[in-house]
Image (tube, rainbow, N blue to C red):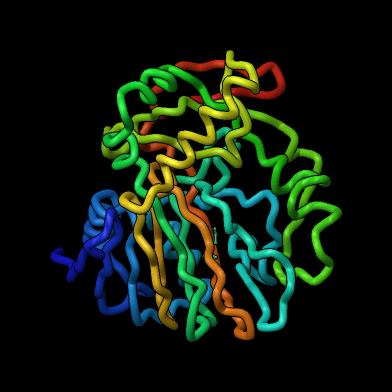
């Protein structure tokens, strides 16, 4: 099955024109998967997926991921609303670079967002290709992270004293559910092998990464900051501009992403579902290890 694919011309990302994602056969799913692995972010314009269709689409690519700190929308346990009202004053959700739920034992392979309400201006989503970022990493920086395990935690965002915790503004329209579990830590190798493509990639960044195993905070913090600057530099980025009725799917295993503002006075609503860790592709390469605080994984 040939897809009509237009690469973004940026570091990653492509637009895919297919007739109707509500009814895709296995050949089309295989073609989309292959395009997804190649371009990392796929945008499908002019799609009419309701929330049942969105769930079915996700299940064509893997199991549902678990979204621990979001409430779901009524009747759809695996769909969350990324919502902001026109008059909302809360700080923007997900404005920091991250990859989804990297603090989990088995983080989601991918994420899908279906546009429901798109502001006329602003609200782009930015992506940063971490395979390209690793390929361009200066040798001296690489030697400082080679073989290292990063310590991941949701505490900065979702713990009771995190960004979305008790002190978050009451005005937020998104259903975010902070809790004590967010203090847990898990480690992952900082350089990982993508389980499907076999490509080496940097995994996650400062934010969900709170430290480096076996390194003091005084040593780790500047290294994390230096890495963050490199990982998110413009040359690795793709800026995604939303259109109404657009579905986007991206690969969390080799990308960072972040939300952007610039649409005050306009509503924005995207429905989100995660493609969970698919055990069919084996474990990511990397040694097991422990932070002493929680289970650790590759
Ligand atoms: C997200 O990180 O899931 C949201 C991205 C966005 O709102 O653009």
The image quarter containing residue 104 is top right
Split into 4 quadrants, where in the image is the N terminus?
Answer: bottom left
Is 173 in front, or is 80?
173
Residue at the image position 72 percent from the left and 40 percent from the top: 155
Is 261 in front, or is 195?
261
Q: In this view, does 80 lie to the left or right of 13?
A: right
Q: In this view, does 19 lie to the left or right of 192?
A: left
* Residue 269: image location, x then y, percent: 58, 76
Q: Is residue 52 above or below residue 127?
A: below
Residue at the image position 34 percent from the left and 68 percent from the top: 43
Location of ligand 1 given as a quarter of the image: bottom right
Q: Is residue 235 above or below residue 17?
A: above
* Residue 15: image location, x then y, percent: 27, 69
Residue at the image position 46 percent from the left and 42 percent from the top: 229
Q: Which residue lies furthest to the left in this view?
A: 2
Residue at the image position 52 percent from the left and 80 percent from the top: 116
Is 289 in front, or is 238?
238
Q: Which residue lies furthest to the top in this view?
A: 214
* Residue 200: image location, x then y, percent: 31, 32
Q: In this view, does 269 lie above or below 105?
A: below
* Residue 266: image location, x then y, percent: 60, 84
The image quarter containing residue 85 is bottom right
């Amino acid at each position: 099955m040939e897809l009509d694919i237009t690469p973004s011309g940026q570091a990653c990302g492509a637009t895919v024109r297919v007739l109707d994602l509500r009814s895709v056969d296995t050949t089309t799913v295989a073609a989309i998967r292959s395009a997804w692995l190649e371009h990392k972010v796929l945008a499908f314009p002019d799609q009419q997926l309701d929330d049942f269709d969105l769930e079915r689409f996700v299940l064509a690519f893997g199991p549902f991921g678990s979204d621990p700190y979001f409430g779901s929308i009524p009747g759809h346990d695996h769909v969350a609303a990324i919502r902001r009202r026109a008059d909302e004053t809360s700080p923007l959700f997900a404005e920091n670079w991250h990859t989804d739920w990297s603090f989990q034992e088995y983080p989601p392979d991918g994420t899908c967002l279906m546009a429901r309400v798109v502001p006329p201006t602003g609200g782009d989503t930015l992506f940063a290709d971490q395979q390209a970022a690793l390929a361009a990493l200066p040798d001296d920086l690489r030697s400082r992270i080679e073989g290292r395990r990063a310590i991941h935690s949701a505490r900065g965002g979702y713990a009771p004293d995190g960004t979305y915790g008790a002190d978050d503004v009451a005005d937020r329209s998104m259903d975010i559910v902070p809790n004590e579990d967010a203090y847990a830590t898990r480690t992952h190798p900082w350089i990982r092998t993508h389980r499907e493509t076999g490509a080496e990639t940097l995994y996650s960044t400062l934010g969900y990464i709170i430290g480096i195993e076996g390194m003091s905070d005084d040593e780790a913090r500047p290294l994390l900051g230096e890495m963050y600057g490199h990982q998110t530099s413009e040359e690795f980025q793709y800026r995604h501009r939303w259109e109404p009725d657009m579905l986007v799917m991206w690969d969390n295993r080799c990308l960072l992403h972040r939300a952007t503002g610039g649409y005050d006075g306009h509503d924005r609503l995207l429905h989100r579902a995660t493609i969970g860790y698919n055990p069919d592709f084996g474990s990511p390469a990397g040694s097991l290890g422990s932070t002493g605080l929680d289970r650790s994984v590759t």
